[in-house]
Image (spheres, grey):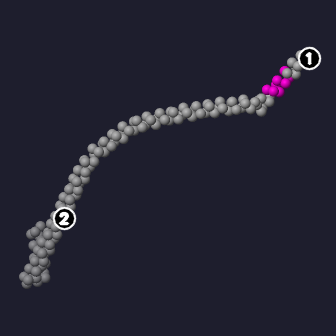
Amino acid sequence: MRASLALLLCLSAAPAVADVAMAGGNPIRKVVTMLQNMEKKVQAEGEKEKELFEKYMCYCKNAGGDLSKSIGDADTKIPQLGADIKEGEAKAKKTEDDFNTFVEGLQKSYEDASKKKDEDVAAIKNSGLGFAKAVKAANAKGKQEL
């Protein structure tokens, strides 16, 4: 009877011990569980870092070739751009010279026209014609020029 009483006592105490393990738990079990969870997190972080590292290395390998190509293209374009700049400067100089020649021609034409007008006015004044005769003569001369 004592054996059955001891067995009954052990069985009735087992759920209480399980509740204590669940509620407060075994400190060693808690530490072991915590370490296992930490190990999982560290492994997941390591895999992420490895994946990122591989992506970065791929970028470095590919970007190096792209950068070298870009640098080569730029080195090729530099002399061409220098020639284009010189050509543009020469065109600008020629355009400026043409403009100055045109302006000088306009000024000369204006001066010649002003001189001719002054000569015509002086000729009319010196011809001794009256004002009415001068107007008629100018009108007739204007119609002849048209």
Q: Quadrant of the N terminus?
A: top right
Name the residue: 59% across, 33% down: 42
Residue on which disc 2 sits: 100
Residue on which disc 1 sits: 2
Residue with the most extreme left position: 127
* 75 shown above or below 22: below
The answer to whether residue 9 is seen in the rendering is yes
- Residue 4, image x, y percentages: 89, 16
- Tell me the chief SS of the magenta region: helix
Mark 2 lies on a secondary structure that is helix
Residue 26 belongs to the span the image colors magenta: no
Q: Which residues are magenta?
A: 11-18
Residue 12 belongs to the span the image colors magenta: yes
Q: Please indicate whether residue 143 sits to the left or right of residue 31 in the image.
A: left
Name the residue: 91% across, 17% down: 2
Q: Please indicate whether residue 74 sits to the left or right of residue 139 in the image.
A: right
Crowding near the residue tagged with mark 1, few <14, some 14–19, many ≥20 C-alpha atoms within 10 Å: few
> Which one is in front in this view, the residue at disc 2 or the one at disc 1?
1
Residue 127 quadrant: bottom left
